[in-house]
Amino acid sequence: QVQLVESGGGSVQAGGSLRLSCAASEYTTSRYCMAWFRQGPGKEREGVAAITPGVGSTYYADSVKGRFTISQDHAKNTLYLQMNSLKPEDTAMYYCAAATWCSATYWHASHFGYWGQGTQVTVSS
């Protein structure tokens, strides 16, 4: 059973940085496509970034390219999201998710079967 637990959220001013972590059950990051999603108030859940288990190919939403970096540590079974140059529009609940596979054109929320409980990120102007 895949278990995912996010941490690292908080409140920050615009332009600041945060690093989110997702602690996964054993072997998850090395066997599953891992991703970060977010859902802002009154908005649909959207993909932020994803990373494949083998080659470690990464995919990003256009809105975060150049500002966010997804990475993983297989030895620690942990997924990360480094968020720099944060903007108020980045305010959302951030979720970690896992899927058996993903690709550059196929990593939308409905494809992921395992989810964490979320961690809140609030960016003030």
Image (cartoon, grey):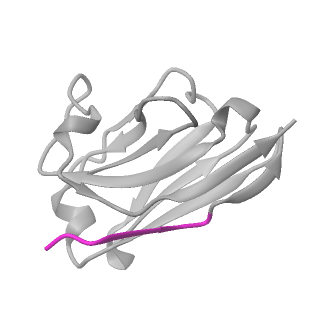
- Pick the quarter of the image with the N terminus: bottom left
- Residue 103 percent coordinates (x, y): 20, 32
> Is 117 located above or below residue 84 in the figure?
below
> Is 111 located above or below residue 66 in the figure?
below
Q: Is residue 81 magenta?
A: no
**Residue at x 41%, y 35% (from the top left corner):** 45
Residue sitting at the far front: 42
**Residue at x 40%, y 60% (from the top left corner):** 72
- Pick the quarter of the image with the C terminus: top right
> Is 67 located above or below residue 98 in the figure?
above
| 93 with respect to 36 (left or right) | right
Q: Which residue occupies the foreground of this view, 105 or 115? A: 115
| 118 with respect to 2 (left or right) | right
- Residue 122 percent coordinates (x, y): 71, 48
| Span of residues in magenta | 1-8
Quarter of the view holding residue 106: top left
**Residue at x 51%, y 65% (from the top left corner):** 21
Q: Which residue occupies the foreground of this view, 90 or 73? A: 90
> Is 16 located above or below residue 45 in the figure?
below
**Residue at x 26%, y 77% (from the top left corner):** 25
- Residue 82 percent coordinates (x, y): 60, 51
Report the number of discs.
Answer: 0
| 45 with respect to 18 (left or right) | left
Quarter of the view holding residue 2: bottom left
Quarter of the view holding residue 65: top right
- Residue 37 percent coordinates (x, y): 42, 42
Q: Which residue occupies the foreground of this view, 51 or 124? A: 124
| 38 with respect to 14 (left or right) | left
